[in-house]
Amino acid sequence: MQYRSYMQVPMNLAQTESLFSACLKPRCSAAQRTRARHLMCENDRIPHELALHIYGNNVSGACVKSLAATYPACFRILGETCFNNIAHRFIEHSPSVQPDLNHYGAAFSDFLGEWTQSLTAFSDFRYLGELAHLEWLCHTAYYAEDDPPFDFRTLAKASQDVQETFRFQLGHSVGLLQSDYPVMAIRATNLSDNAATEVQAAELPEYLVVSRPAFQIRVERVDAYTFEVLAACQQGITLGHITGTRQDHTNMIPRILPGLIQCGWITAMAAEKTGLREHP
């Protein structure tokens, strides 16, 4: 006579889906696999453990393909075999927790950066973490929601005291990156159809702004001052605090602010008392 080593508790649909999702991940526990096997339909051709293994491989394969599509420059530099091996390690470390793989892989740049920094074999590829960060910003910019038109009327009507309480907000597609490597040129070179060549480092660090004007991803290099202002806006610092930190800010902000709004990098504002618009 056989005895169950556990009591089988009825599960609702959400619990069942959660269990099977956990079983498809590399670090699934033995207890979870046992429970999942008892919920699966009998199949004389494919054992339950093999079926779970096949499903798990399909999920991992889809995640690897998604990462390769999100990080095409890194994929080309590393080559398919090397990139896929690193991607599988990343999936084990950070499995997907949502069905939409377009949102998967945010932590890959940090993972790749730690990987290249810790292994001697990758000493010539220390830049890959920051390159991956740039590629992620480009990826998220593509899927970012649209921004409403800037409210020039409110800005024009506000007194100087009220304007100093404004927090200028970056567009949903706008991303900022300060890099010690020429990642803008490295990305462009490896996304072209031409054979990859060595990239000459321009003035470093480089200050980059990612945006999506007219539904086209654009990466632009800006000066340190413009980057500092945009970073302050991203952090939710008020206009009064930005202009008060340095004397040259007081003179420069009125000159550069219209251009930042016109190119779509700054798309909204809110007075300090109203709080910030939620940003993805």
Image: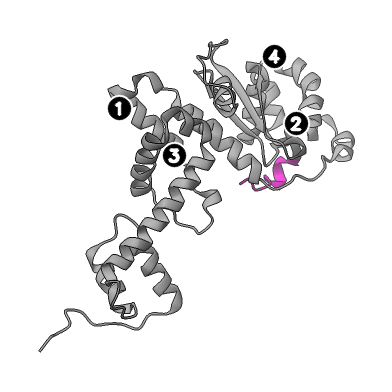
Q: Earlier in the sequence, mark 4 or mark 1?
A: 1
Q: Is residue 180 left or right of residue 274?
A: left
Q: Secondary structure at mark 4?
A: helix
- In the rendered image, residue 127, in percent from the top left (x then y), is placed at 45, 23
Q: Position of residue 251 (x, y in %)?
A: 77, 15
The residue beneath circle 3 is 108
Question: Which residue is pictured at 67% across the width and 42% down the height?
Answer: 172
For marks 1 and 2, give the CA distance: 46 Å
Position of residue 39 relative to residue 67, above or below, is below
Mark 2, Cα crowd under 10 Å, few <14 / some 14-19 / many 20+, is: some
- Residue 90 visible (yes or no): yes
Which class describes the residues within 10 Å of circle 3: few (<14), some (14-19), or many (20+)? many
**Label 2 close to label 4 by CB (< 8 Å):** no
Image location of residue 80, percent across then percent down? 42, 36
Q: Which of 199/269 is in front? A: 199
Q: Identify the secondary structure beneath mark 1.
A: helix
User: What number is the disc on residue 247?
Assistant: 4
Q: Which residues are magenta?
A: 269-280
Q: Earlier in the sequence, mark 2 or mark 4?
A: 2
Tell me the amino acid under the disc marked 4: Gln
What residue occupies the far left of the structure in this picture?
1
Please tell me whether residue 189 is drawn above or below residue 141 in the rendered image.
Answer: above
Mark nearer the N terminus (3 vs 4) = 3
Q: Amino acid at mark 3?
A: Phe
Q: What is the spatial separation of the Cα atoms under label 1 and label 3, in whole angstroms?
A: 15 Å
Q: Pointer 2: what residue?
A: 164
Q: Quadrant of residue 37?
A: bottom left
What residue sits right under mark 1 in the picture? 118
In the picture, residue 41 is in which quadrant? Answer: bottom left
64 falls in the magenta region: no
